[in-house]
Structure formats: structure tokens, C-alpha cells
């Protein structure tokens, strides 16, 4: 890993004035469709990622979900327990990756979804970008991406640094999870700005907005209209979704009710749409003051 200083005037790296974590450009995921799920902390990215992973698997795809959070809680509804992280297992062999076996860091979850928890450096030290890079490198070394159809990165919180933007160097599409409120839309705007910067040098494009935990979408709709985005799925605020996390289960394992069935169908529809190609969005981030003035009730 190297930390880059801002490029000279007239030359741009990952956006103007970027001070960025650069990963090895030779370490690429391959032919799988790669999605990075972003959004404000606590907005439901892990729930969204896990249920979307199952939906892809239900469509017959071979799926790998990579959690990118030191809490390593992205995949527990799939595996039913907290899995050790890549950083944990690397540390256990003094970072000699050749001593690791696949079963040390890849775990099969519900409906055959393969699960990896990248983890993160100790608090206040290191960089999340390094962790993502080491995880992808390890998966490549063990040929675990050769037969994978879909890879989903579940990324920690808002994009505030190059490290947490690192999955965008691998992803084809970035999906933003947002609720119908000011805080998550403000975070979404930051994410749109990060993806716009990354798209100058990488293939990643915005894949749209997943409205989550929201009965209505009027505030998201206001932002989308100005920023050039669209809502590609709407997951309502159901208590059954909260209960699924407490049961350590995906929504596809919950008791069959009309509400649960509708949400399952929405995830299956979203997975089919994304697999078919979906739509790319350019996305135009707004100024902070403009968002403040835009949102709210007349």
C-alpha cells in the first residue's frame, strides 16, 4: 500500500487534489458482476446486502459477499454467527498468507452465499483501503473469484476517505442505501461525490438508490431529481425486518406473510434488474447549503 500525495497541477489521480490509497492495479476481481453498497451508518446496508445476496443466489448465481467493517457483522444473518476477519486470520499466521486455507476465511452461508469479513485495522491506526486490498488479493491467490458470478461489497458508512472508497476501484456499480430523511440524503450526496471522482479513472458507475426503512420517498425524490438519480428499489419500514436481524436470519427465512413476501419479491426484482445490466447514472453532487435548502416541507 502506498499513500499518494496530491498530483501535480494538470494531472489528476482519483479526482482533483486526491490524497488516496492506491491498490495494486494488477489485482482485479475478474468477470464477476461487482456491486459496492454504500450509505449512512446504521441505514441498513448489511441487511440490504445480505438479502440482495440471497436474491441473486435464488436466481441461480454464485454469490460472494464481502463485509468491509471492523464490526464484522455484515454476514451474520447468512452464517448465523460472527465470522473471523481476514485481518484476524492473517495476523494469526504473522501475515504469511500462503499458510492459510480457504476455510480459514471464507464461510458458506444461507442458500450457498459465500461470506468473507474483511475486518479492519485497530481503531485509530491503519487504513480500510489496505484491508480491502489484502482481502481481494487473498481471494485471487486461492482462485475463489474464478467461479463467482456476483460479488457484493458491504462498505462501512459514508465515504469520508480513500480507504473506504477502495471497493469502488473493483466495483462495476455502486448502490446507495438511503432513508427518506436529511441525514441519510446528506450522506448519499457525499457518496455521489466520491463515485463521481472514482469514475474518472475506474469503471464504477452509480447504479441507483435503494430507499430503505421509509414509508414515503418524497425527500429522496427531491434529491434524485436534482442529482440525476433514480430509486431502483423501495424497502418499507417493517418491524419484521428488524426482527430478522435479531433472529440472525435473512428475510427469505422469515415466516411467510404478505409483507415479507412483498419485500422478498422486491429483492428478487432488484437482483434480476441488476443482473440484466440496469442503468448507469452520472450523478451530480450538490453543495451542502443547497441540500439544506432543498429538503423539508413547504
Image (tube, grey):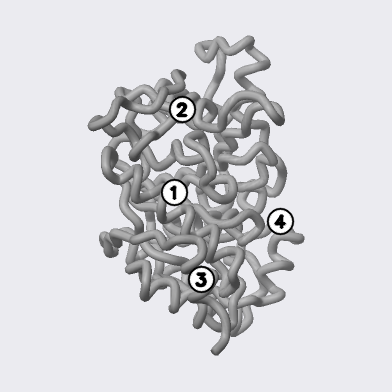
N-terminal label among 4 and 1 = 1
User: Which quadrant holds residue 182?
Assistant: bottom right
Task: Reply above or below: 294 against 10.
Answer: below
202 relative position to 114: left or right:
left
Residue contact at pointers 3 and 4, CB within 8 angstroms? no
In this figure, which residue is indicated by the disc labeled 3?
211
Q: Callout 4: few (<14), some (14-19), or many (20+) C-alpha neighbours within 10 Å?
A: some
Disc 1 to disc 3, how far (Cα)?
Answer: 16 Å
The C terminus, quarter of image: bottom right
Determine crowd level at label 2: few under 14, some 14-19, many 20+ residues with C-alpha closer than 10 A.
Answer: many
Q: What residue is pinned by disc 1?
A: 36
Mark sitting on residue 248: 4
Among the two numbered marks 3 and 2 on one chain, the one whose residue lies closer to the N terminus: 2
Neighbours of disc 1 within 10 Å: few (<14), some (14-19), many (20+) = many
Earlier-in-chain disc, 1 versus 2: 1
Q: Alpha-carbon distance for marks 4 and 1? A: 22 Å
The secondary structure type at the circle numbered 2 is: helix
Amino acid at each position: 500500500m502506498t499513500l499518494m500525495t496530491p498530483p501535480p497541477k494538470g494531472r489528476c489521480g482519483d479526482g482533483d487534489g486526491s490524497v488516496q490509497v492506491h491498490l495494486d492495479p494488477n489485482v482485479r476481481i475478474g468477470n464477476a458482476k461487482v456491486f459496492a453498497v454504500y450509505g449512512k451508518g446504521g441505514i441498513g446496508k448489511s441487511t440490504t446486502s445480505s438479502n440482495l445476496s440471497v436474491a441473486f443466489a435464488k436466481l441461480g448465481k454464485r454469490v460472494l459477499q464481502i463485509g468491509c467493517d471492523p464490526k464484522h457483522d455484515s454476514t451474520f444473518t447468512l452464517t448465523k454467527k460472527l465470522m473471523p476477519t481476514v485481518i484476524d486470520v492473517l495476523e494469526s499466521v504473522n501475515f504469511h498468507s500462503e499458510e492459510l486455507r480457504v476455510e480459514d476465511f471464507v464461510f458458506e452461508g444461507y442458500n450457498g452465499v459465500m461470506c468473507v469479513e474483511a475486518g479492519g485495522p485497530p481503531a485509530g491506526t491503519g487504513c480500510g483501503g489496505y484491508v480491502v486490498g489484502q482481502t481481494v488479493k487473498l481471494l485471487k491467490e486461492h482462485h475463489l473469484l474464478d467461479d463467482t458470478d456476483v460479488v457484493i461489497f458491504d462498505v462501512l458508512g459514508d465515504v469520508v476517505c480513500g480507504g473506504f472508497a477502495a471497493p469502488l476501484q473493483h466495483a462495476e456499480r455502486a448502490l446507495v442505501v438511503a432513508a427518506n430523511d436529511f441525514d441519510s440524503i446528506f450522506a448519499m450526496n457525499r457518496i455521489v461525490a466520491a463515485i463521481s471522482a472514482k469514475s474518472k479513472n475506474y469503471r464504477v458507475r452509480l447504479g441507483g438508490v435503494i430507499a430503505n426503512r421509509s414509508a414515503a420517498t418524497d425527500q429522496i425524490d427531491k434529491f434524485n431529481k436534482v442529482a440525476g438519480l433514480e430509486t431502483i428499489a423501495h424497502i418499507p419500514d417493517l418491524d419484521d425486518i428488524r426482527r430478522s436481524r435479531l433472529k440472525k436470519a435473512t428475510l427469505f427465512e422469515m415466516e411467510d406473510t404478505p409483507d415479507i413476501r412483498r419485500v422478498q419479491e422486491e429483492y428478487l426484482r432488484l437482483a434480476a434488474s441488476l443482473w440484466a445490466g440496469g442503468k448507469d447514472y452520472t450523478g451530480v453532487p450538490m453543495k451542502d447549503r443547497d441540500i439544506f435548502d432543498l429538503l423539508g416541507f413547504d
